[in-house]
Image (spheres, rainbow, N blue to C red):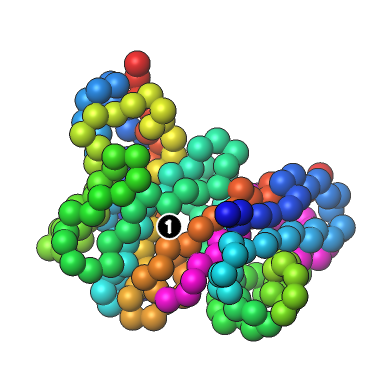
Amino acid sequence: NAGVMQNPRHLVRRRGQEARLRCSPMKGHSHVYWYRQLPEEGLKFMVYLQKENIIDESGMPKERFSAEFPKEGPSILRIQQVVRGDSAAYFCASSLGGSYNEQFFGPGTRLTVL
Amino acid sequence: AQSVAQPEDQVNVAEGNPLTVKCTYSVSGNPYLFWYVQYPNRGLQFLLKYITGDNLVKGSYGFEAEFNKSQTSFHLKKPSALVSDSALYFCAVRDGAGANNLFFGTGTRLTVIP
């Protein structure tokens, strides 16, 4: 029973390049969440998606960041024209939905912007 | 607005002794409370949750937590600490009034000393 999968685990980009982070939720989960973790800090919510819909993107920066969860395939977090401040660990979580169900987290993608 | 406070950045405890990791919260509706553990370079692992019912919640690896509504606390406990419990612990809250995301504390690093 595979858990939440994220790839790549490590991603290095130069300033101005694009970063694409992928997340495959647990089998049977149709709710996906993206969080960002800066060193020595807790996780900060970015966006919540269900299949083909963005439900809540209140934590997403207004520019350069976008997310999708297509009908087929993984969820994608896309960061355009990366800057050094984007360096962080990005975690994806999935759940069955509902406020009371726990979220299951992937291993994260560590983005380093040179 | 939701908030979570973990007042201790670091907790040290001797192996075999009881451990407590503190958490207090603030939400406008009913709180849904969660504890997660993070090992180095890994994603978060779910430990336990409180939704409703008994105030004492038992979870994975011998951990438990007590929900105290009057003190708005949800402290994590274990009767006898193991060296392998050394990790970063995060408390999280979700507002049962319909919030989509988890709001995380800044984390407490637990070190169990052999």
- The residue under the point 18% across, 54% down is B56
Horizontal relation, residue B8 to residue A48: left or right: left
Vertical side of A93 occupied by A31: above or below: below
Could you tell me residue B59's position as x and y percent?
31, 49
- The residue under the point 24% across, 29% down is B80
Q: Quadrant of residue B63?
A: top left
**A52 and A90: which is toward the camera:** A52
**B10 and B48: which is toward the camera:** B48
Q: Quadrant of residue A6?
A: bottom right
- The residue under the point 58% across, 54% down is A1
Could you tell me residue A48's position as x and y percent?
57, 73
Q: Residue furthest top?
A: B114
Q: On the image, numbered disc 1 is attached to which residue?
A: B104
- The residue under the point 68% across, 50% down is A109
Could you tell me residue B83's position as x and y percent?
38, 24
> Given the image, on which type of amino acid does mark 1 rest?
Phe
Q: Is residue A81 visible?
A: yes
**A16 and B11: which is toward the camera:** B11
Which segment is the magenta one?
A78-98
